[in-house]
Image (cartoon, coloured by chain):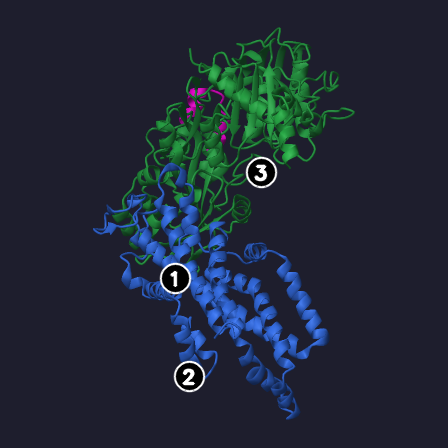
Amino acid sequence: MALRDRHWRDRRLADVLRSGIVKPLLPAAACLALLAAAPTPSQAATLTVGTSAEPSALDPHYHNLGPNTRARKHVFESLVSMDAKMRLQPELAESWRAVDETTWEFTLRKGVKFHDGTEFTAQDFVYTVCRIPNVANSPSSFTVYTKGIAAIETPNPHTLVIRTGKPYPLLPMELSTFGIISAKAAGGEAVTFDKAGCKADSWPTTQAFNDGSLMIGTGPFKHKSYTKGDRQVLERNPDYWGPQAAWDTVVFRPITSDGPRVAALLAGDVDMIESPPVQDIERLKSAPNVSLAQAQSNRVIYLALGVQDTPPTITGTDGKNPLKDPKVRKALSLAVDRDAIVKRIMMGVAEPANQYLPAGFYGNNPEVTVATDANKAKQLLAEAGYPKGFQLTLGTPNDRYINDDKVAQAVAQMFTRIGVQTQVDATTANVFFSKRNKQEYSVFLAGWGADSGEMSSPLKALIATPIKEKGYGTTNYTSYSDPELDGMLDTALATVDDAKREKLLQAAVKRAVDADIIIPLHYEVTVWAMKKGLSYEPRADQYTLAQKVTPAK
Amino acid sequence: MSSVAAKAPAVETPFLRLAREYARSRTALAGLAVLILIVLAALLARWVVPQDPYDLAQLDILDGMMAPGSLGGGGWTYWLGTDDQGRDMLSAIVFGLRTSLLVGVVATLIALAVGVAVGLLAAYAGDRVDGLVMRLVDIQLSFPAILIALILLALLGKGVDKVIVALAAVQWAYYARTIRGSALVERRKEYIEAAQCLALPHQRIMMRHLLPNCLPPLIVVATVQVAHAIALEATLSFLGVGVPVTQPSLGMLIASGYQYMLSGDYWVSLFPGLALLVTIVAINLVGDRLRDVLNPRLSH
């Protein structure tokens, strides 16, 4: 032992370094050095982001899911994009116009290069639209956004003429949802569009994107490497057509637990994190080296009241469903104190909601209001024939939305106060959604993020009568059906004139909120926390885009 | 626990002797006193605390997340603060203790009954029955209790009754193994042989002769297992598979306060955690002392 000790002492420092004992510490030391050397991040060209969820694949068309789209937007671009307030912006299309009710013309940007150096042309768009329905095992396909397209013509490589079967005002918005891949890289230069299904020998596999071989887009970053569960590394595209990103290298690290994600930021392991937990916001605000950015999101948290003939989770009413009575539904809406929920459960990091999209979004109706009045609620219950109330069970996920089960408990408390004895069934999201989709809850709490950023999205999905061909009622698990409201939506969705359509949607949302089927609770507020010295314009669509993160001047 | 011990030797003099023995350890006496206090508080919960935390109408969300010592809207002081739903922590802890004790004791009694029946039968019948039953016990004991309980609760759903079933299902094997061990020893003794020669019915031999003489180790195991059951219930509730969210037990209170710990709102997790700790330590102290007192090799 003593011999070995002396041997150890005799070794020189250089030997020790070479021996590798210190090697694991080197990256850490490098980080420390970086931190010390670069209090102004303008010199540091690497941005590390801790994300709250990881994409299920890098394939831009595999899964229509928030984290996937966030990852996609760095490498692949679309014809049209949305700005931080979800207004449409030109991206790969310089401009577009509606030639007539069913024909759109897009003028494509010239001189845009894919990461492999080839030029972007109209054929890449055609190939992308063709590939989207041909992704194997897609859990949630982008075909919902391409099925409106009836025909595509390419008079020249930089002009696209898209025809829709019927008037389709949402086309430009829907074209902002999917990224365009390179037809040449995938071997699809000869593929032509056919509504019934395009012909090709083979389609690119999701695996080819995940291993990086087909990660060839036009975006501000090139894909460098990807280790599932650990990190995705991107590097700047020096030939980007638009403004250059401030970062040479961007690292996205999924840190799905809230506590460790906050800790990683405070410890300096990452420069920026998505959605810190609401209870930590105060602490982060007072931390000296952290700044926050927050924006109202497009996601509304709501209660859905089911009007099934036999209520699945209501007792004390002799098998009748009290929620069929509009007075009872109004009473439940009046019972909810939205300000208290926002203040106590959401710690102020949310906004009380009176409809399905916040003010400023397309289709928001400033005349729609919801009230809180427990006495009026009791009175309405008595008038409806339930002076002693009834018992109900409220279903909620406990890991899907911010503080979801706590909000549900607060709602249960408020219902119980007006005489409706309420229990909460809080389960993990998978269990909750499968039970909800089988209509096993009379009342449930859930959320809806309008990815189109306008009012037709929640109305179509949550309250319209389920009609598969129209894509109506895809998330309507209340058995509610109002043909008049469906008619209003039909008219709105066939009106290409933006101002007229907004008026129609405003009328529809008023009718929907007044029906008290989907009771709005609050809009989630998305928060980003980052090292002081970085700035980020908070986005309503909740995406964290590295190209928009800038070192402060 | 002492009342359980009282029935064990079935005669009064040994009980007095045991009580005297037990009282020699001051720590054990203190543990017993704390335990009695906790049990009384839990039994009289409705009368000793200001709020019924399971009655949603009595909660006010506007009183949520108040620090210990704050004056609430209801006119009384929240000595231990409130949680995010405006639940008085003191009331919630006492009611949570009641749930924990109920689950612990009832689950232990059921497991004890099942385990004793199976273990005794195995020891008395011997041969194939013994081999079969004990391999079953071995298999069950080779899985962590928490894993089996999690799976059972995932299948059964939420509720106090379901937690009791799950805990009884994971614990019976301990008793079966314990009683089989002592029954195997007792079975070879002369009094059992005598009873067998008298051609007494098997049932009578097992219940009246074998069982009473196997009881002391069982009592010790049962006492410690109550503490174990309480800890297991707290773990399950912490993981969110135990009791419903509107009727929190100690584990669930700790879980709901856990995310506030880093933010400085310590009380939601800390006080239920302390209550759980004190309860389990008290039960273990009592159990340890009982083991010493009931062990013939250690006495005198």
Looking at the rendered image, the quarter that the N terminus of chain B falls into is: bottom left
What are the residue bounds of the magenta stretch?
A489-503
Amino acid tagged 3: Lys
Q: How far apart are labels 2 and 3 at the CA level?
A: 79 Å
Q: Mark 2 sits on what residue?
A: B12
Q: Is residue B274 above or below residue A498?
A: below
Q: Mark 3 sits on what residue?
A: A468
Q: Is residue A454 magenta?
A: no
Left-right relation of A367 to A487: left
What is the quadrant of residue A66 in the picture? top right
Specify the subunit that label 1 lies on. Answer: B
Chain identifier, green in the render: A
Depth check, front residue: A338 or B84? B84
Amino acid tagged 2: Glu
Element type where label 2 sits in the image? helix
Q: Is residue A493 magenta?
A: yes
Q: Position of residue B60 (x, y in %)?
A: 29, 48
Q: Is residue B117 visible?
A: yes
CB-based contact (under 8 Å), mark 1 and mark 3: no
Specify the subunit that label 2 lies on. Answer: B
Specify the subunit that label 3 lies on. Answer: A
Q: Residues within 10 Å of mark 3 (few under 14, many from 20)?
A: few
Q: Position of residue A248 (x, y in %)?
A: 57, 14
Q: How far apart are labels 2 and 1 at the CA level?
A: 31 Å
Q: Mark 1 sits on what residue?
A: B98
Amino acid tagged 1: Arg
Q: Position of residue A147 (x, y in %)?
A: 61, 28
Q: Position of residue B76 (x, y in %)?
A: 22, 52
What is the quadrant of residue A140 in the picture? top right
Depth check, front residue: B265 or B159? B265
Which residue is painted at 44% across and 16% down in the image? A39
